[in-house]
């Protein structure tokens, strides 16, 4: 976990001369510089574009492991177990834990790190909690910028844990290099983890809390659901873990490494370009949503009336809004 700096915020900002100075210090392993860069990128401060430009030559080395699934599956406890395993083999680990934010204040409890005890007092583990900012896909665009900061910080693997609100959490598919979808027995809905949105993005399916009654049944259900999934030419592993004891974690990480070797073989630029496309798509959606919420312009009313009359498709209306944005 990040140590508290003895400097007050004004002194902390004054200590960094230029964006290039910040990134040089991030590359050297200075945690205070990393915390500063992460904060600036998260809030998209005026210096954020310069920071992003300064770190570009140093990006594309970290493997981003997305971890998603329904509430109660034990994602944060599993992340803690993964951290322990990775540190046992001397891997540096960055963690981005996305927590749900209040629809009123925009704030979040940011409590995931409470369960990540493996991050305590370890300078080779960096945990950052982010608010979802109301994004239904389980992530906010800030997560992508923070990934870049941790990548520049020379972490070997970045664990990206999403909010955990159900099958809408598919943004992680556009951001992570490898996607783990976590389920567990006894969640109250036997097919909860098999909803098509989550099932279709999985590279690895994990049944956590494997020591509970019903774990084998859940595994068989997942295997059955995967058997009728549209063929991709790849067999999706279904693995059982018990995060509280560490059982199954080594096998899980072996599966991650097998897929990771294929991911690393792809050009770095292409892996990062996918995340850039996600940011562009999200920004375009936000532009359209903003215009619709504004909703008082005569042009928008005309588009709305045309959609209601059936003379204009919603897709074409959205294109027109983007054109005029």
Image (cartoon, grey):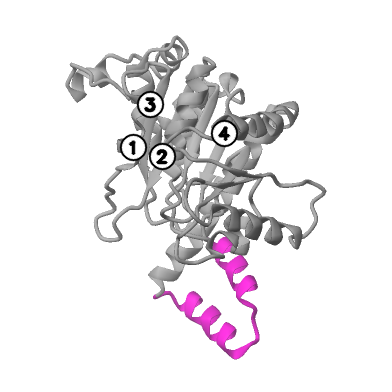
Q: Earlier in the sequence, mark 3 or mark 2?
A: 2
For the magenta stretch, what is the residue range?
296-325
Work out which residue is located at the far right of the displayed protein and give it: 233
As measured in the structure, the alpha-carbon distance from the residue carrying label 4 to the one carrying label 2 is 18 Å
Do tag 3 and tag 2 residues touch (Cβ < 8 Å)? Answer: no
Residue visible at 34% across and 14% down?
17
* Depicted 233 relative to depicted 245: above or below: below
Task: Say whether residue 185 is magenta.
Answer: no
Residue 43 shows up from this direction: no
Image mark for residue 51: none
x, y (%) of residue 54?
A: 50, 21
**Closest to the observer, 211 or 258:** 211
Q: Which residue is mark 1?
A: 115
Image mark for residue 118: 3
Q: Earlier in the sequence, mark 1 or mark 2?
A: 2
Do tag 1 and tag 2 residues touch (Cβ < 8 Å)? Answer: yes
As measured in the structure, the alpha-carbon distance from the residue carrying label 3 to the one carrying label 4 is 19 Å
Mark in front: 4 vs 2: 2
x, y (%) of residue 50?
A: 45, 26
x, y (%) of residue 78?
A: 46, 39
Image mark for residue 77: 2
Residue visible at 19% across and 23% down?
10
The reply, left or right, for residue 181 in relation to residue 230 is left
Q: Earlier in the sequence, mark 3 or mark 4?
A: 4
């Amino acid at each position: 976990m990040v140590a508290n700096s003895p400097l007050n915020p004004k002194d902390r900002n004054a200590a960094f001369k230029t964006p290039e100075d910040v990134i040089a210090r991030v590359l050297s392993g200075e945690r205070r510089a990393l915390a500063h860069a992460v904060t600036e990128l998260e809030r998209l401060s005026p210096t954020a574009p310069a920071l992003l430009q300064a770190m570009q030559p140093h990006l594309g080395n970290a493997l981003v492991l997305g971890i998603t699934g329904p509430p109660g599956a034990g994602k944060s406890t599993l992340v803690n177990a993964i951290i322990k395993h990775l540190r046992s083999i001397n891997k540096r680990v960055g963690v981005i834990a996305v927590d749900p934010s209040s629809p009123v204040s925009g704030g979040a409890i940011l409590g995931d790190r409470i369960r990540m005890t493996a991050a305590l007092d370890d300078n080779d583990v960096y945990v950052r909690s982010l608010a979802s900012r109301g994004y239904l896909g389980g992530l906010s665009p800030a997560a992508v910028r923070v990934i870049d900061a941790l990548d520049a910080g020379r972490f070997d693997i970045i664990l990206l844990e999403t909010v955990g609100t159900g099958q809408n959490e598919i943004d992680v598919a556009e951001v992570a290099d490898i996607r783990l979808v976590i389920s567990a027995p006894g969640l109250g809905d036997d097919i909860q983890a098999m909803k098509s949105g989550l099932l279709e993005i999985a590279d690895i399916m994990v049944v956590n809390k494997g020591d509970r009654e019903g774990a084998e049944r859940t595994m068989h259900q997942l295997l059955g659901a995967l058997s009728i999934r549209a063929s991709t030419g790849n067999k999706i592993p279904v693995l059982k873990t018990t995060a509280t004891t560490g059982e199954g974690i080594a096998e899980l990480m072996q599966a991650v490494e097998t897929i990771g070797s294929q991911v690393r073989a792809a050009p770095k630029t292409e892996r990062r370009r996918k995340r850039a496309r996600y940011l562009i798509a999200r920004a375009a959606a936000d532009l359209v949503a903003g215009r619709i919420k504004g909703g008082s312009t005569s042009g928008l009313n005309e588009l709305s009336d045309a959609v209601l009359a059936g003379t204009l498709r919603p897709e074409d209306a959205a294109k027109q809004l983007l054109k005029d944005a």
